[in-house]
Amino acid sequence: MQICVVTRDLYRMLEQFTRIGVGPWRIYTFDQNTVRDQSFRGERRPHSHRLALAWSGTTFWEVIQPLHGDTIYTEWLERHGEGIQHVAQTCGALTFDERIREFGRRGYSVTQSGNFEGKVRFAYVDTEDTTGFAIELIDFPDGYDMPEPEEWYPAPPPK
C-alpha cells in the first residue's frame, strides 16, 4: 500500500522524487502534539520526524526525516544510510490488533508505534532480518482523510 524512504534531508529527497515525476508532496510533522502513545522498542519514548506523502499512479510514497529521539528511522540511517526502510500495508480482513498478534505468533515484534491525531493507529513490525525492511501496519478508520498539510512541495496541486 505504501513505500517509505528514510532520509537525512527531506527537501533534497523530495527534489529528487519530483525530478522523476512524483508529487506534489504533502508535508507533516509527527511529534508529541500530533501522535499519541508513542513507543519505541517497548518503551514510551517521545520522538519527532517530518514526513511527506505523494501518489504516483497507484503507488503511495512516503519520505521521512527523523528530527528528535531514538526511532527505527535513526537506526536505519545509522546501519544502512538513506533508502527504502519500510513497506506499509492495511490490515485486510483482520483487525489491527489481530494483525499484530498474527505477526507475534510468527515470531515478529512491534518496534515502534503510535496513534496519529487519535484516529490512525500504526505499528512497525521488525521484519528487517527476513525481508530487508520493516512492515508498517496502518489502521485508517472508514472515511478518514489526511488533514491539510503544513505545506506542499513543490506547490499545491492545481484546483
Image (spheres, rainbow, N blue to C red):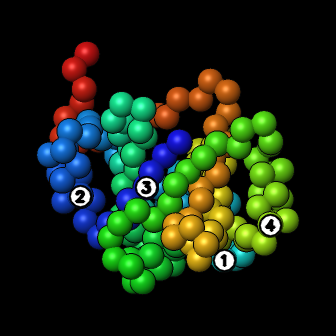
Decide if residue 137 is on the left or right side of residue 56: right
Q: Any mark on residue 106, and which?
A: 4
Residue carrying label 2: 13
In front of the other: 42 or 34: 42
> Looking at the image, which residue sits at the far top?
159
Residue at mark 4 to residue at mark 2: CA–CA distance: 35 Å
Quadrant (top left/top right/bottom left/bottom right) for the C terminus: top left
At numbered mark 1, what does the secondary structure look like: helix, strand or loop? Answer: loop
Q: Any mark on residue 4, and which?
A: 3
Q: Which of marks 2 and 1 is nearer the N terminus?
A: 2
Query: Which of pointers 4 and 2 indicates the residue nearer the eye?
Result: 4
In front of the other: 20 or 14: 20
Decide if residue 96 is on the left or right side of residue 157: right
Residue at mark 4 to residue at mark 3: CA–CA distance: 24 Å
Q: Earlier in the sequence, mark 1 or mark 3?
A: 3
Q: Which of marks 4 and 2 is nearer the N terminus?
A: 2
At numbered mark 4, what does the secondary structure look like: helix, strand or loop? Answer: loop
Q: Which amino acid does label 3 sit on?
A: Cys
> What residue is rendered at 51% in x and 70% in y?
132
Residue 59, given in percent of the width and then of the height, sits at 41, 38
Residue at mark 2 to residue at mark 3: CA–CA distance: 12 Å
Q: Any mark on residue 61, and which?
A: none
Residue at mark 1 to residue at mark 4: CA–CA distance: 18 Å
Residue 63, given in percent of the width and then of the height, sits at 36, 55
Q: Which of marks 4 and 3 is nearer the N terminus?
A: 3
Residue 73, given in percent of the width and then of the height, sits at 46, 70
Q: What residue type is labelled 1?
A: Arg
Residue carrying label 1: 41
